[in-house]
């Protein structure tokens, strides 16, 4: 099942003039507040692992508990802000398409789910939030959307793992990765790579006992905690 996207760019004035006075908004400030609210809504809990935790270095989660103030800088990162704009724009486009009868089925954005697992003597909650779910002809189809600066090497392994984990968590019939890049928009069907409960338990156990530090060889280059980490790879 393919989701066809039509993206339109509609100009809107940043400044509106009323007589001699002008009213403006600060886009950077608005995006900062959006990301700050998201951080506050998803505060860390000891026995809760988010899907994004399971696809990255286990030490990052530990450092986020100890040094949460270091994450504030990520709110201002242009690559994160641009990704936020892409997601907001895509959501608005799909709602517009639905209102104008260009999209069949029901569309939901930012859908969260939760499951519990027994890992040894611990109960671990797994939480996650996929970008989009389309319900069509009795099927629930998930879409995870990524903005990247180049299409070289896509789809990335950690993104594929993330989408497959969402499929497991939300009991989706199908799942797709959508990449939006300056070169092209690409869609990848991951329905032949379904993940099992045993796979999930193995991944969570790796995170709990920290067997892969870092999980991917490139992670340290982008990690705000690398300045203090003795496991940093260079």
Image (cartoon, grey):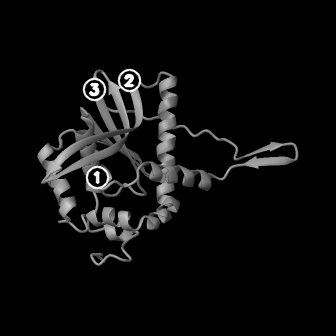
Residue 212 image position (x, y, % from top left)? 20, 66
Secondary structure under tag 2 reads loop
Relative to 187, 200 lies left or right: left
Q: Which disc, if any, is residue 139?
A: 3
Residue 143 image position (x, y, % from top left)? 34, 39
Residue located beneath label 1 in the image:
49
Q: CA distance from mark 1 to mark 2?
A: 31 Å
Relative to 79, 27 lies left or right: right
Residue 106 image position (x, y, % from top left)? 39, 25
Secondary structure under tag 1 reads strand
Residue 129 image position (x, y, % from top left)? 35, 43
Q: CA distance from mark 2 to mark 3?
A: 10 Å
Closer to the camera in the image, 220 or 54? 54
Number of numbered discs on residues: 3
In the image, farthest residue toward the front: 121
Q: For the residues carrying marks 3 and 1, which lies nearer the camera in this image?
A: 1
Relative to 225, 30 lies left or right: right
Q: Earlier in the sequence, mark 1 or mark 2?
A: 1
Relative to 19, 71 lies left or right: left
Is 185 situated above or below 226?
above
Q: Which disc, if any, is residue 105?
A: 2
Using the rendered image of the protein, determine whether residue 154 is visible from the camera's viewpoint: no
Q: CA distance from mark 3 to mark 1?
A: 27 Å
Q: Residue at x 38, y 77 (%)?
A: 227
Q: For the residues carrying marks 1 and 2, which lies nearer the camera in this image?
A: 1
Q: Residue at x 48, y 37 (%)?
A: 91
How many C-alpha atoms fall within 10 Å of the one at disc 3: few (<14), some, or many (≥20)? some
Q: Earlier in the sequence, mark 2 or mark 3?
A: 2
Using the rendered image of the protein, determine whether residue 3 is visible from the camera's viewpoint: yes
Q: Are marks 3 and 1 in contact (CB under 8 Å)?
A: no
How many C-alpha atoms fall within 10 Å of the one at disc 1: few (<14), some, or many (≥20)? many
């Amino acid at each position: 099942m393919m989701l066809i996207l039509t993206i339109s760019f509609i100009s809107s004035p940043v400044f509106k003039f009323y007589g001699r006075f002008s009213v403006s908004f600060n886009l950077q400030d608005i995006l900062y507040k959006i990301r700050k609210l998201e951080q506050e809504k998803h505060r860390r809990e000891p026995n809760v692992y988010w899907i994004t935790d399971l696809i990255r270095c286990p030490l990052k989660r530990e450092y986020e508990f100890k040094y949460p103030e270091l994450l504030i800088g990520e709110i201002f990162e242009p690559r994160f802000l641009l990704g936020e704009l892409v997601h907001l724009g895509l959501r608005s486009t799909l709602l517009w398409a639905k209102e104008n009868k260009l999209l069949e089925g029901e569309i939901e954005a930012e859908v969260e789910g939760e499951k519990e697992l027994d890992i040894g003597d611990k109960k671990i909650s797994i939480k996650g939030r996929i970008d989009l779910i389309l319900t069509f002809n009795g099927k629930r189809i998930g879409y995870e959307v990524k903005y990247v600066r180049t299409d070289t090497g896509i789809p990335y392994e950690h993104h594929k793992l993330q989408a497959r984990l969402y499929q497991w968590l939300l009991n989706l019939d199908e799942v797709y990765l959508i990449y939006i890049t300056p070169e092209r928009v690409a869609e990848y069907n991951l329905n032949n790579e379904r993940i099992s409960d045993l796979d999930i338990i193995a991944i969570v156990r790796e995170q709990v006992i920290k067997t892969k530090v870092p999980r991917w060889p490139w992670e340290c280059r982008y990690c705000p905690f690398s300045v203090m980490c003795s496991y940093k790879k260079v």
